[in-house]
Amino acid sequence: MPRKIESEKRFITLYLDNGVVERIDRLAAAQDASRAKYLERLIVEHLDEDEATVQAFTNPVLLNALMQVFGQPDVARQLVQTMRRDVSDDQLQLFQEAMMTTAEKMNKRAARKPMKRVRRKPKKKGGGG
């Protein structure tokens, strides 16, 4: 069971690669913050952006529009060229396929019913059999 640190905060366990932890520690120290405070601030700052992105990509109208737009070679080519990249026809096709695949995956996720979270009962300590 997660232990509570403060009335509105919960303790969580997080496994990260050593290199990631070292980067976090370096940045936290540079800002005179603890690892936990640094991570909390970093997460909070990015939650709004991520929520907006997920909401946009689960909107069936927007997904349909994206699929229509990226299905047209001229539109996709102009978009890639606005990023100031010269692309071959093969690269353009890969870009279009990636965008269509992403849109289709997001559309499937939006169509799924949200999963119910199942709480498992903690295992009993001691005797068994």
Image (cartoon, rainbow, N blue to C red):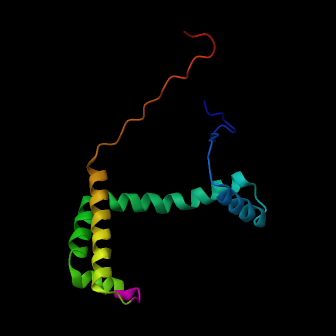
- As displayed, is residue 5 above or below residue 38? above
Where residue 54 sits in the image (x, y, percent)? 39, 58
- As displayed, is residue 21 above or below residue 96? above
Quarter containing the C terminus: top right
Nearest to the observer: residue 42 or residue 129: 129
Q: Is residue 59 shown to the viewer in this render?
A: no
Q: Give left or right: position of 73 versus 8.
A: left
Q: How many marks?
A: 0
Q: Is residue 67 magenta?
A: no
Q: Is residue 81 shown to the viewer in this render?
A: yes
Answer with the quarter of the image where residue 101 lies. bottom left
Residue at the image point whose x is 32% and y is 75% from the top: 95
Answer with the quarter of the image where residue 75 lies. bottom left
Prevailing SS of the magenta stretch: loop
Where residue 29 sits in the image (x, y, percent)? 78, 62
- As displayed, is residue 111 above or below residue 8? below
Q: Give left or right: position of 13 versus 115.
A: right
Residue at the image point whose x is 27% and y is 67% from the top: 100
Q: Is residue 83 magenta?
A: yes
Quarter containing the N terminus: top right
Where residue 108 sits in the image (x, y, percent)? 27, 53
Residue at the image point whose x is 58% and y is 17% from the top: 124
Where residue 102 sits in the image (x, y, percent)? 32, 63
Residue at the image point whose x is 56% and y is 20% from the top: 123
Answer with the quarter of the image where residue 78 lies. bottom left
Identify the magenta region: 81-85
Q: Give left or right: position of 4 versus 54.
A: right
